[in-house]
Amino acid sequence: MVNLRRIGGLAVAAVTVATTGILSAGPANAASNWLSDPNSCTNVKTAVQKDWSGYTIQVRYGTCGGVQYGWGRVINYRDGAYIRFEVDTTGDRVADGSDLRYAPSRNYTSGYRTSTSSARAFRACVVFSEKETCLYSNGATAWW
């Protein structure tokens, strides 16, 4: 004879473990911090800007749906240029995430949620390869 009470207890334990895993996952998934197209944000301002070799590279920020985001933008771009936007979430000023766009197709990146924490920072740069990062680009803004 099968002990239904024991099976029922195991089922409740499994549901409890699954629920605890979801609840202890912490804040929203990092992917939910990204906004695919910040073009409709309002109150847009430029946080930092760098003029380099005819390019104007910017970190911009604005409000979309009541949430503030930052993103990268390049003005005066030419064929072969990409705009790269890097996000530091740990405070070490090393990119923990990034977005890259081919400037002639779209001269601004996806947006990332801003934070009051000094650990979060953004920078943007012009690169000429999908593999290049802002670390090695002369056309990079300061971290903001």
Image: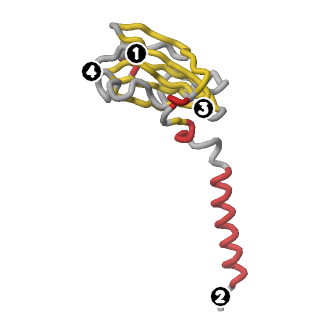
Label 4 crowd (10 A; few <14 / some 14-19 / many >=20): few
Element at badge 4?
A: loop
State the scheme by which the image is colored. Answer: secondary structure
Secondary element under disc 2, as helix, strand or loop, is loop
Q: How far apart, in angstroms, are the residues tagged by discs 4 and 1?
A: 12 Å
Q: Residue at x 45, y 25 (%)?
A: 85
Q: Nearer the viewer, mark 2 or mark 3?
A: 3
Q: Residue 2 — which label?
A: 2
Q: CA distance from mark 2 to mark 3?
A: 56 Å
| Quarter of the picture holding the N terminus | bottom right
Residue assigned mark 1: 75
- Residue occupying image coordinates x 61% and y 27%: 63
Q: Residue furthest left?
A: 79
Quadrant in which the C terminus is drawn: top right
Identify the residue position indicated by label 4 in the image.
79
Percent coordinates x, y for residue 46 in the rendering: 54, 15
Q: Secondary structure at mark 3?
A: strand
Q: What is the x, y in percent for residue 37?
A: 49, 33
Q: Are marks 2 and 3 in contact (CB under 8 Å)?
A: no
Structural distance between the alpha carbons of marks 2 and 4: 71 Å
Q: Position of residue 60 (x, y in %)?
A: 53, 20
**How many residues crowd mark 2 within 10 Å: few (<14), some (14–19), many (20+)?**
few
Q: Residue at x 40, y 15 (%)?
A: 75
Q: What residue would you read off at disc 3?
A: 64
- Dot 2 or dot 4: first in sequence order is 2
Residue 75, above or below 84: above
Q: Secondary structure at mark 1?
A: strand
Q: Mark 3: which amino acid?
A: Cys
Three-letter residue code for mark 4 = Asp
* Quadrant position of residue 10: bottom right
